[in-house]
Image (spheres, helix red, strand yellow):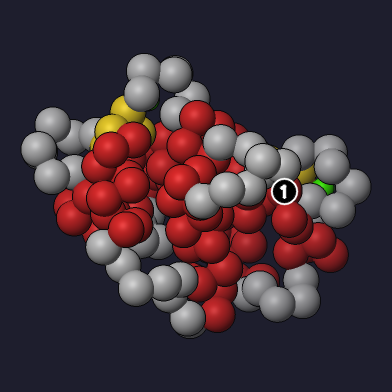
């Protein structure tokens, strides 16, 4: 459960653009990789995975070694995500894993995409997070 909340943390911050916080970046824009003003499921998962990846990648080489992954994570999961078996989880492997699984973005798409066009606009994102009472704990 703790890992789940951690993964969702960057997502929850997407809504922080409405609160006065001049020093923080526009996370919606950061997540919107193709800058079309809408977030697709893959953009949401890429964004979350990117953030989680960066937190673990201590030496910033875009690869996670087992020592960067452990402790706190499961070695069996590491082996699953290291799809080419080279002993590292590359950013591409992590992103592919993120797209193939669901750590909350499925629900966000389902509930946040109110007009059902398959993506989340800034207004939809704001409404979605505004309807929540606060960060999930
Ligand atoms: Ca987009
Ligand atoms: Ca690394
Ligand atoms: Ca690998």
- Give residue 55's quadrant in the image: bottom right
Horizontal and vertical percent for residue 40? Answer: 32, 34
Ligand 1, seen in the image, is in the quarter at top left
Relative to 7, say whether 30 is above or below. above
Task: Decide which of 58, 10 is in the foreground and name it.
Answer: 10
Q: Residue furthest front?
A: 20
**For the residue with label 1, is its CB less than 8 Å from the closest atom of ligand 2?**
no
Instruction: From the viewer's perspective, tell me whether residue 76 is left or right of residue 29.
Output: right
Q: Residue furthest left?
A: 115
Query: Residue tagged by mark 1?
Result: 54
Relative to 93, say whether 30 is above or below. above
Q: Residue at x 44, y 19 (%)?
A: 35
Instruction: From the viewer's perspective, tell me whether residue 83 is left or right of residue 71.
Output: left
Relative to 22, say whether 80 is above or below. below
- Give residue 6's quadrant in the image: bottom right
Q: Residue at x 34, y 73 (%)?
A: 133
Relative to 120, say whether 127 is above or below. below
In the structure shown, which secondary structural element does the residue marked by tag 1 occupy? helix
């Amino acid at each position: 459960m703790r890992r789940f909340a951690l993964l969702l943390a960057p997502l929850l911050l997407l809504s922080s653009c409405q609160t006065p916080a001049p020093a923080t970046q526009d996370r919606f824009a950061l997540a919107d990789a193709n800058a079309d003003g809408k977030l697709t499921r893959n953009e949401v998962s890429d964004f979350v995975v990117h953030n989680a990846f960066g937190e673990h990648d201590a030496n910033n080489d875009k690869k996670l070694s087992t020592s960067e992954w452990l402790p706190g994570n499961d070695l069996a999961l590491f082996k699953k995500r290291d799809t080419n078996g080279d002993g590292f989880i590359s950013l591409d492997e992590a992103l592919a894993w993120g797209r193939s699984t669901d750590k909350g973005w499925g629900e966000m798409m389902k509930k946040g995409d109110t007009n059902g066009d398959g993506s989340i606009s800034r207004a939809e994102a704001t409404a979605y997070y505004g309807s929540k009472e606060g960060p999930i704990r």
